[in-house]
């Protein structure tokens, strides 16, 4: 029982610190910083004390089923906590680094306009970090995973009056959502492989895992690759490496805690946590090792040509994480954990002293710079070196691929639906949805062919809606409604599976419906007040003029994305638990709808409320950094 309370305190202490930090005024810097420092210090003492106690017990596995949030005959959603050596290393490193960052930030962030907002977000991130680290199953881990994603967005866009930080925050959040596809797919396939919410403790049972994989090797490979997708996106591995230096637009302390030391290593964490599952899958281990090797090779050369210190540190960290992927694939867990802790401490130190180092180097260069003499050499060796140099300057076109190939292709699909406008959206949606509901109520009389493919068609219709929302530039209200209607399409599509009950549909739709309606009304009110400046072609920075409305829309955005503040988060997991094993397209369409819809929603929020504030009486602000 004592152990139960201690594990629970790892999330209760940061939660209390976060809630306390919301109470104090933004002008009371002393109290805000003290709350953060005392919270992280107290947490550090608890972590160190418990780890020492755990070592005296012989380092056993500790698994605690904390709370059942939803249960029926076929499904159980519960919070599960797990503690082992991976948890111990990540908890200790995270608590120590966060304590240093909060202490450093007390003076570094002095007199910043967002002083309170910064410490609010840091404590919120720390809550998500601890929650993820002690998670005992995929469902619990996904809660912390989502908290990490939204806190990353908020910290990158900390200087929200500037164009570039906000733009890069949306870009980084988009990559994070790609990682979410992998995690959702792994959760869906795990439900069908185990017929339960499998815990990480059970994954340590070699005979159980081996027995299931022998009978379902294809599903095992799918889960392994899905986990790798989540890990690669979260840890900025190839081909997603370009997002990490762009995430350095936030304050230096947030760059240190997020992208130098802690958050960027969660790809390594999820691979370590799920290693017992895929260790017998030789193909998965080869792919993980090759991913790390390619990333380390490319990032090493990119690091050598960067002209900003933050970008150099970012790519140096990516290189080391690539090596950690290789270590995990080889089964060298202890080395990987030591490597993680060492890299986290080193990058934290480098980022925190980087302003002083830059100042020193500029001064030293001013007095002692001597140009290096170069000779022309057209040999093969020199041509190869110049090719590597040019590719490294271009970051091996990774950012180009993501922006101009992947996301631009999604926008291209959405533009085929430009006939949808706010005036005729209901004219198209209501009749089609009514026909779908009619087929659902008369399912027994449907021909087999229609019954077989109708759920996929409805889910595809919802996916097309979010693609239209993702590409929409003129009507934010239209984009918002399209994402909301997509949730109704997904719920209807899954309802054709006989075990999906009406109460589960209502649980899922309850959160997104309330959030969607309130958010739409607020955006509509702003449209009435600002009729000339309410499209999505630029950033308007309305958070300066409408701060309360901005907060409401942010919360509604989280609810509409299925963030764990509404019942829709549980309903989202229910949706995937009822998608049948053979319904690959239905699962794919549903996952893509959730992910792209989340990107579209956060893009609406960012463009309306963040960025340079555009006053009606002045010219448009420049898109400067």
Image (spheres, rainbow, N blue to C red):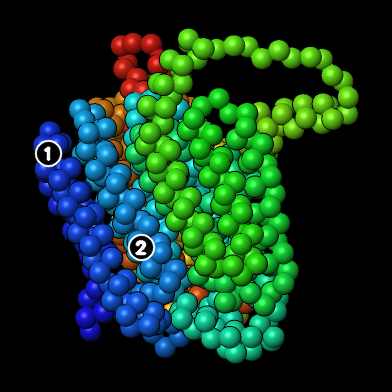
In the structure shown, which secondary structural element does the residue marked by tag 1 occupy? helix
Question: Dot 2, crowdedness within 10 Å: few (<14), some or many (≥20)?
Answer: many
Residue under the point 62% across and 32% down: 304
41 lies left or right of 135:
left
Question: Label 2 vs label 1: CA separation?
Answer: 27 Å
Q: Secondary structure at mark 2?
A: helix
Q: Quadrant of the C terminus?
A: top left
Q: Residue 624's x, y, as percent?
A: 45, 19
Asked if residue 370 is positioned above or below residue 517 in the image, the reply reads: above
Which is nearer the eye, 86 or 182? 86
Q: Nearer the viewer, residue 97 or 571?
A: 97
Q: Position of residue 230 (x, y in %)?
A: 55, 58
Position of the N terminus, as image quadrant, is bottom left
Question: Where is residue 169 drawn, in percent x and y?
Answer: 44, 38
Looking at the image, is 5 positioned above or below residue 456? below
In this view of the protein, which residue sits in the foreground, 439 or 389? Answer: 389
- Residue that badge 1 annotates: 30
Q: Is residue 274 left or right of residue 108?
A: right
The mark nearer the N terminus, 2 or 1, is: 1
**Camera-side residue of 625 and 310:** 310
- Write the residue at 65% across / 67% down: 330
Residue 613 shows up from this direction: yes
Is residue 427 in view? no
Quadrant of the rendered structure where residue 223 is? bottom right
Q: Position of residue 474 (x, y in %)?
A: 48, 31
Count of numbered circles on the image: 2
* Position of 231 relative to 313 (above/below): below
The numbered mark at residue 91 is: 2
* Residue at the farthest right position: 379
Residue at 65% from the left image edge and 48% from the top image edge: 295
């Amino acid at each position: 029982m004592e152990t139960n309370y201690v594990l629970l305190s790892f999330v209760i202490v940061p939660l209390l610190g976060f809630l306390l930090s919301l109470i104090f005024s933004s002008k009371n810097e002393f109290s805000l910083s003290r709350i953060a420092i005392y919270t992280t210090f107290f947490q550090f003492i608890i972590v160190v004390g418990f780890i020492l106690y755990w070592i005296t017990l012989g380092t056993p596995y500790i698994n605690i089923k904390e709370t059942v949030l939803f249960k029926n005959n076929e499904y159980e959603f519960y919070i599960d906590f797990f503690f082992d050596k991976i948890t111990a290393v990540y908890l200790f490193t995270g608590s120590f680094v966060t304590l240093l960052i909060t202490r450093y930030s007390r003076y570094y962030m002095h007199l910043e306009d967002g002083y309170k907002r910064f410490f609010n977000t840091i404590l919120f991130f720390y809550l998500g970090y601890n929650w993820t680290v002690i998670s005992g199953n995929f469902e619990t881990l996904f809660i912390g995973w989502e908290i990490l994603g939204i806190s990353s967005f908020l910290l990158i866009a900390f200087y929200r009056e500037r164009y570039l930080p906000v733009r890069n925050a949306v870009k980084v959040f988009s990559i994070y959502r790609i990682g979410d596809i992998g995690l959702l797919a792994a959760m869906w396939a795990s439900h069908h492989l185990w017929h339960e919410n499998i815990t990480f403790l059970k994954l340590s049972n070699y005979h159980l895992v081996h027995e299931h994989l022998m009978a379902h090797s294809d599903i095992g490979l799918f889960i392994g690759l899905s986990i790798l997708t989540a890990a690669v996106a979260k840890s900025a591995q190839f081909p997603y490496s370009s997002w990490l230096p762009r995430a350095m637009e936030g304050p230096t302390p947030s760059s240190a805690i997020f992208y130098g030391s802690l958050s960027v290593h969660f790809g390594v964490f999820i691979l370590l946590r799920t290693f017992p599952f895929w260790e017998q899958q030789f193909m998965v281990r080869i792919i993980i090792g090759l991913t790390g090797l390619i990333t380390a090779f490319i990032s090493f050369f990119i690091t050598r040509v960067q002209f900003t210190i933050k970008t150099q540190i970012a790519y140096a960290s990516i290189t080391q994480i690539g090596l950690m992927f290789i270590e995990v694939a080889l089964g060298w867990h202890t080395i990987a954990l030591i490597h993680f802790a060492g890299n986290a401490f080193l990058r934290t130190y480098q980022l925190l002293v980087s302003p002083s180092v830059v100042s020193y180097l500029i001064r030293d260069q001013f007095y002692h710079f001597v140009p290096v003499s170069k000779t022309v050499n057209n040999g093969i060796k020199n041509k190869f070196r110049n090719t590597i140099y040019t590719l490294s300057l271009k970051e091996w076109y990774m950012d180009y691929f993501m922006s101009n190939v992947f996301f631009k292709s999604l926008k291209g699909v959405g533009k085929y639906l430009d006939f949808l406008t706010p005036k005729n959206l209901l004219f198209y949606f209501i009749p089609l949805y009514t026909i779908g509901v009619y087929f659902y109520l008369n399912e027994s009389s449907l021909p087999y062919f229609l019954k077989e493919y109708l759920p996929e068609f409805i889910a595809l219709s919802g996916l097309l809606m979010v693609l239209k929302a993702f590409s929409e530039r003129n009507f934010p209200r239209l984009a918002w409604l399209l994402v909301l209607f997509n949730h109704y399409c997904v719920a209807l599509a899954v309802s054709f599976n006989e075990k999906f009950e009406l109460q589960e549909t209502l649980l899922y739709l309850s959160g997104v419906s309330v959030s969607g309606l309130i958010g739409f009304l607020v955006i509509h009110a702003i449209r009435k007040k600002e009729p000339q400046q309410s499209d999505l072609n630029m950033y308007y920075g309305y958070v300066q003029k409408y701060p309360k409305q901005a907060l409401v829309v942010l919360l509604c955005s989280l609810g509409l994305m299925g963030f764990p503040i509404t019942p829709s988060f549980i309903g989202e997991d229910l949706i995937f638990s009822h998608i049948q094993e053979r319904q690959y397209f239905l699962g794919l369409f549903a996952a893509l709808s959730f992910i792209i819809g989340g990107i579209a929603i956060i893009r609406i929020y960012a463009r309306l409320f963040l960025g340079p504030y555009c006053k009606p009486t002045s010219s448009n602000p420049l898109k400067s950094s």
